[in-house]
Image (tube, rainbow, N blue to C red):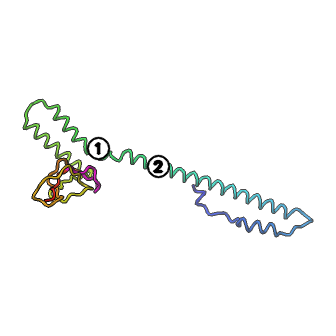
Amino acid sequence: MEEQNQKPSNTPPVDTVVDEVANAPVEQAGNAPRDDAAAQLAALEAKARENYDLFLRATAEGENIRRRAQEDVAKAHKFAIESFAEYLLPVMDSLQAALADSSGDINKLREGVELTARQLSSAFDKGRIVELNPVGEKFDPHRHQAISMVPSDQDANTVVTVLQRGYLIADRVLRPALVTVAAPK
């Protein structure tokens, strides 16, 4: 890579050398101008080879960067859920402990389920999953799914009950809330 950062040698540009060679006086008495032209041609060919080598190296480096970027994106897609999965592992541990409990104590089981629900809620918070609780809000078809309309004292198209909770992840609907909506009077 150091070759790319070096300043070019003091050889004149190709156009200048070609013009000089074309306009040089031709001496009949000796081969000095021809030897000089051959030396300049050899220098130009060496410079062309050097530039071609630099071009190939730059092209290969660009291709390597593109390939590494594609691999990074593929890994990001593949392992994007890894951190959220780590938040869920304690929840699974608690559920397995509850299933393994054979004491038959309902209060102890209820306490364990409440603890597990808090762990799951904490995992949702860390994963930026927010519960939708639209009771009393105006019906929003982007965030709610109406199952039925029921007579109610509330304004028309207001959510009366939530049958199944909805969830947002980073302000995007993960699952709409299943709701009943107040019917028009």
Mark 1 closeness class: few <14, some 14–19, many ≥20 residues within 10 Å: few
The tag on residue 17 is: none
Q: Which residue is mark 1?
A: 85
Q: Residue 171: percent from the left, percent from the top?
A: 28, 57
User: From what the image shows, is residue 105 above or below residue 119?
Assistant: above
Q: Which residue is mark 2?
A: 70
User: From what the image shows, is residue 123 above or below residue 28?
Assistant: above
* Quadrant of image for the C terminus: bottom left
Instruction: Specify the farthest residue to the top.
Output: 102
The quadrant holding residue 140 is bottom left
Q: Secondary structure at mark 2?
A: helix
* Quadrant of image for the N terminus: bottom right
**Which segment did they paint magenta?**
167-178
Camera-nearest residue between 168 and 43: 168
Name the magenta segment's main secondary structure: strand
Which residue appears at 19% of the width and 60% of the height? 138
The quadrant holding residue 42 is bottom right
Is 109 on the left-hand or right-hand side of 164?
left
Confirm or deny contact between disc 1 and disc 2 (CB under 8 A). no
Which residue appears at 62% of the width and 63% of the height? 7
* Residue kind at label 1, given as amino acid type: Ala
Q: Secondary structure at mark 1?
A: helix
- Residue 173 drawn in magenta: yes
Chain-order first, disc 1 or disc 2 = 2
- Residue 2 drawn in magenta: no
Q: Residue 111: percent from the left, percent from the top?
A: 10, 41
Which residue appears at 84% of the width and 64% of the height? 33
Is 118 on the left-hand or right-hand side of 72?
left
Which residue appears at 14% of the width and 58% of the height? 136
* Residue kind at label 2, given as amino acid type: Gln
